[in-house]
């Protein structure tokens, strides 16, 4: 009988040094183990950039902090968890030297946005939302393109799903300045 293979768990720092996946896509670290995600399709990427444009435009015009895509956030240590949300927002006062780090952000985003792909399971999406919230992420959006909905999750257990007739505001995005307005009918048009 062959001995079971023991695969060492990686730290976030070891994970950072790995080469990217050979066929594209993104990688995340879940309890020290590398998870590779396939590249996304056109509709997914178009929705991410449109949503990012709404968030970035408001955040930048008010000096609130960076909005970006697929940056690694170290949510936990021993074993390490590094997630790369489709979009993120980080309040400017949390940045060291006023900039995002060149490597992973050691901490959580203030807003994590996950756009659900056709091959994502509800179980995997829910597990990711719970991991973000357990680590202290104040707001997590789950965007479901096929249903044209955005569910806003908060640490107190509140999860509200918004549809085509709804508008997301500053409080939904974690913006300290009022005036952000995202009509979901426009986003999903």
Image (spheres, helix red, strand yellow):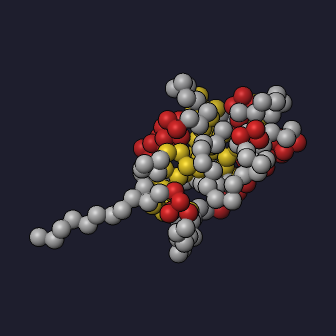
Q: Is residue 31 left or right of residue 151?
A: left
- Taking the view exactly as shown, the residue that stands out farthest to the left is 1
Quarter of the image for residue 178 reads top right
Q: Is residue 26 left or right of residue 2?
A: right
Residue in the picture at 53% in, 75% down: 22
- Taking the view exactly as shown, the residue that stands out farthest to the bottom is 22
166 or 171: which is nearer to us? Answer: 171
x then y, percent, for residue 16: 56, 63
x then y, percent, for residue 105: 63, 50
Count up the numbered dots: 0
Name above or below for residue 73 compared with residue 36: above
Q: Is residue 28 left or right of residue 54?
A: left
Residue in the picture at 36% in, 62% down: 8
x then y, percent, for residue 73: 59, 50
The quarter of the image holding the N terminus is bottom left
Q: In the rendered image, is residue 68 in sight?
A: yes
Residue in the picture at 71% in, 33% down: 174
Name above or below for residue 159 compared with residue 182: above
Q: In the rendered image, is residue 119 in sight?
A: no
x then y, percent, for residue 173: 71, 35
Q: Is residue 82 left or right of residue 178?
A: left
- Taking the view exactly as shown, the residue that stands out farthest to the front is 97
84 or 47: which is nearer to us? Answer: 84
Residue in the picture at 80% in, 34% down: 180
């Amino acid at each position: 009988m062959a001995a079971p293979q023991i695969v060492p768990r990686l730290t976030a720092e070891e994970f950072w040094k790995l080469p990217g996946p050979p066929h594209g896509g993104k990688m995340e670290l879940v309890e020290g183990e590398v998870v590779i995600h396939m590249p996304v399709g056109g509709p997914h990427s178009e929705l991410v950039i449109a949503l990012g444009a709404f968030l970035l435009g408001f955040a930048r015009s008010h000096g609130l902090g960076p909005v970006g895509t697929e940056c690694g956030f170290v949510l936990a240590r021993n074993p390490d968890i590094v997630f790369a949300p489709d979009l993120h927002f980080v309040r400017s006062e949390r940045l060291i030297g006023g900039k995002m780090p060149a490597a992973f952000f050691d901490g959580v985003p203030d807003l994590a946005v996950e756009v659900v792909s056709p091959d994502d399971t509800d179980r995997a999406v829910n597990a990711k939302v719970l991991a973000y919230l357990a680590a202290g992420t104040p707001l997590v959006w789950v965007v479901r393109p096929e249903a044209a909905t955005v569910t806003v999750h908060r640490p107190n257990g509140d999860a509200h799903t918004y549809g085509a007739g709804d508008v997301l505001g500053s409080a939904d995005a974690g913006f300290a300045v009022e005036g952000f307005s995202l009509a979901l009918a426009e986003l999903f048009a």
